Image (cartoon, helix red, strand yellow):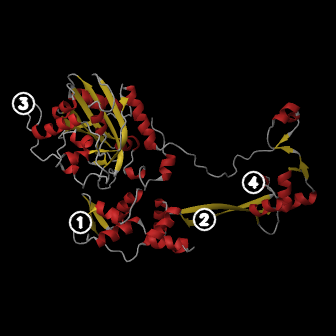
């Protein structure tokens, strides 16, 4: 019998009475563990060895988990701040608690979602009301236990939750032990010759012609291999890029602009009254930065006049306070219509001559209550068309053509009121799994009170669509938090099929 060098060395080092691990044998033979593993499986296939596998699992606290062990879980810090602020008696403004709990960046989303999930408080309209008072938090206790090497004391449900949150990671290792079979012992006693085999084809082997007489090592395609998760484009980004391709194909050009902008561009140009509920601290993320000074003074005057007096002989305005200081205040944009206002006014640098088509697919920020269809930040598909004599039929036809590119043909329209468009309507699509209608966007034709101060003297139809809702219609997701945010399902994102 002839065997390749690695197989022969492994067979001679193995024992018939004591199981020895591949790691031990590889160290003893000074060989690559992967090569020894391959040799073990090949010898097992020949009946000369037996290979036994055991999967060992080791838990450890991640860097984020260690940070929360020191500072406290975000939801516990938020609850403590709410309790100190008297939220057990009456609701307390969320923005105040976020600062007092020292929550930063993604910790805000984490705190809000887990506070509600655990029943420690309720979040509604930008305020927090306390719920039950836990004697001890199972997840915080479990983190300490795992860090102390006492993971066996942690329940499976709690452990699964910590893994989902990325606070604990599980490292699984497969160890293999080999033992000589009776046939293996017999083969060794009878004597085995070393076979001169070639494991790889090299340029030298080809040029010398030795490949014609060489004996090649067999490759075991059934041998276990480590699972490698390659990098891939996030499904949300992939869908956003496809939306851009579709709109460019429909003749649109892309807009760009700041995420933090003056309320003037975000709301005032849009003919949103300054006392509108959506412009209060409950619904917007105001920034503690100096007001924006670089606003076009003539446009500011025309917008203020439209708010106070309306436009045209029949205009009436809002008869409500209008404060230029508030208009200059900076906030995170609640919609990307701020980009539309910059472009339509000509202050984004674009020279407009009807017909024109523009779009953007960008992030917006709203102080919403978290649920399966709402997040504090999401992507909006903004678009508008400037042309003469536009109608609702043009708008509906645009949506029909757009959504058909994604295989969605059952869009429904419902009349709606917006301060900035007339007529206006919402769009609804039917969820492929639940068969429920979900809102996917808002649209209409801009009012004269919006267009006249901007210097636009023709029709403009516009819309804001939710990219995440489009994703739900395409893939059947029922909770957008599975694909976007701190609680996303990584396995789902790794394995989701491409829909194109």
Report if residue 183 is visible in the image.
Answer: no
Q: Nearer the viewer, mark 2 or mark 4?
A: 2
Give the image location of residue 185, x and y in percent: 86, 62
- Residue denoted by label 2: 57
Front in this rendered view, residue 69 or 295: 295
Q: Nearer the viewer, mark 3 or mark 1?
A: 3
- Residue denoted by label 3: 313
Tag of residue 111: none
- Residue denoted by label 1: 91
Q: SS at mark 3?
A: loop
Task: Please report whichever mark, 1 or 4, sits nearer to the chain's N-terminal start.
Answer: 4
Report if residue 202 is visible in the image.
Answer: yes
Q: For marks 2 and 3, give the CA distance.
A: 77 Å
Task: Please report whichever mark, 3 or 4, sits nearer to the chain's N-terminal start.
Answer: 4
Task: Give the side of residue 104 with respect to residue 495, left or right.
Answer: left
Tag of residue 41: 4
Task: Please report whichever mark, 2 or 4, sits nearer to the chain's N-terminal start.
Answer: 4
Task: Please report whichever mark, 3 or 1, sits nearer to the chain's N-terminal start.
Answer: 1
Task: Give the side of residue 52 with respect to residue 313, left or right.
Answer: right
Q: Nearer the viewer, mark 3 or mark 4?
A: 3
Q: For marks 1 and 4, give the CA distance.
A: 65 Å
Q: SS at mark 2?
A: strand
Q: Residues within 10 Å of mark 1 (few under 14, many from 20)?
A: some
Q: Nearer the viewer, mark 2 or mark 3?
A: 3
Which quadrant would residue 137 be assigned to in this image?
bottom left
């Amino acid at each position: 019998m002839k065997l390749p060098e690695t197989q022969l060395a492994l067979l001679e080092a193995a024992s018939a009475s004591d199981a020895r691990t591949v790691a031990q044998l590889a160290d003893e033979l000074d060989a690559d563990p992967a090569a020894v593993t391959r040799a073990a499986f090949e010898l097992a296939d020949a009946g000369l060895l037996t290979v036994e596998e055991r999967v060992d699992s080791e838990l450890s606290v991640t860097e984020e988990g260690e940070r929360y062990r020191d500072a406290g879980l975000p939801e516990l810090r938020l609850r403590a701040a709410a309790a100190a602020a008297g939220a057990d008696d009456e609701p307390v403004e969320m923005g105040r608690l976020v600062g007092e709990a020292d929550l930063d960046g993604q910790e805000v989303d984490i705190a809000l979602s887990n506070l509600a999930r655990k029943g420690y408080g309720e979040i509604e309209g930008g305020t927090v009301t306390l719920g039950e008072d836990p004697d001890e938090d199972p997840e915080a206790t479990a983190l300490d236990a795992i860090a102390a090497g006492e993971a066996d004391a942690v329940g499976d449900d709690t452990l699964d939750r910590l893994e989902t949150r990325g606070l604990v990671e599980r490292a699984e290792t497969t160890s293999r032990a080999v033992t000589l079979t009776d046939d293996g012992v017999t083969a060794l006693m009878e004597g085995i010759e070393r076979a001169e085999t070639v494991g790889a084809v090299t340029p030298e082997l080809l040029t010398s012609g030795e490949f014609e007489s060489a004996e090649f090592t067999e490759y075991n395609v059934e041998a276990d291999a480590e699972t490698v998760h390659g990098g891939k484009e996030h499904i949300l980004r992939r869908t956003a890029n496809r939306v851009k391709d579709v709109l460019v194909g429909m003749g649109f050009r892309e807009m760009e602009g700041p995420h933090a902008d003056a309320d003037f561009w975000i709301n005032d140009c849009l003919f949103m009254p300054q006392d509108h509920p959506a412009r209060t601290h409950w619904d917007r993320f105001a920034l503690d930065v100096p007001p924006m000074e670089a606003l076009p003074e003539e446009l500011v005057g025309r917008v203020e006049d439209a708010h106070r007096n309306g436009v045209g002989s029949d205009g009436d305005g809002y008869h409500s306070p209008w404060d230029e200081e508030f208009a200059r205040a900076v906030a995170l944009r609640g919609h990307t219509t701020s980009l539309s206002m910059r472009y339509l006014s000509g202050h984004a640098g674009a020279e407009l001559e009807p017909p024109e088509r523009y779009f953007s697919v960008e992030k917006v920020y709203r102080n919403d209550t978290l649920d399966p269809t709402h997040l504090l930040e999401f992507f909006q598909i903004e678009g508008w068309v400037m042309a003469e004599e536009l109608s609702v039929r043009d708008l509906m036809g645009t949506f029909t053509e757009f959504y058909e590119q994604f295989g969605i043909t059952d869009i429904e329209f419902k009349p709606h009121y917006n301060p900035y468009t007339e007529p206006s309507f919402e769009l609804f699509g039917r969820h492929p799994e639940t068969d429920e209608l979900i809102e996917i966007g808002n649209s209409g034709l801009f009012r004269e009170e919006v267009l006249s101060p901007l210097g636009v003297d023709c029709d403009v139809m516009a819309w804001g669509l939710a990219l995440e809702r489009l994703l739900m219609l395409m893939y059947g997701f029922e909770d957008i938090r599975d694909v976007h945010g701190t609680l996303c399902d990584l396995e789902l994102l790794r394995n989701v099929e491409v829909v194109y």
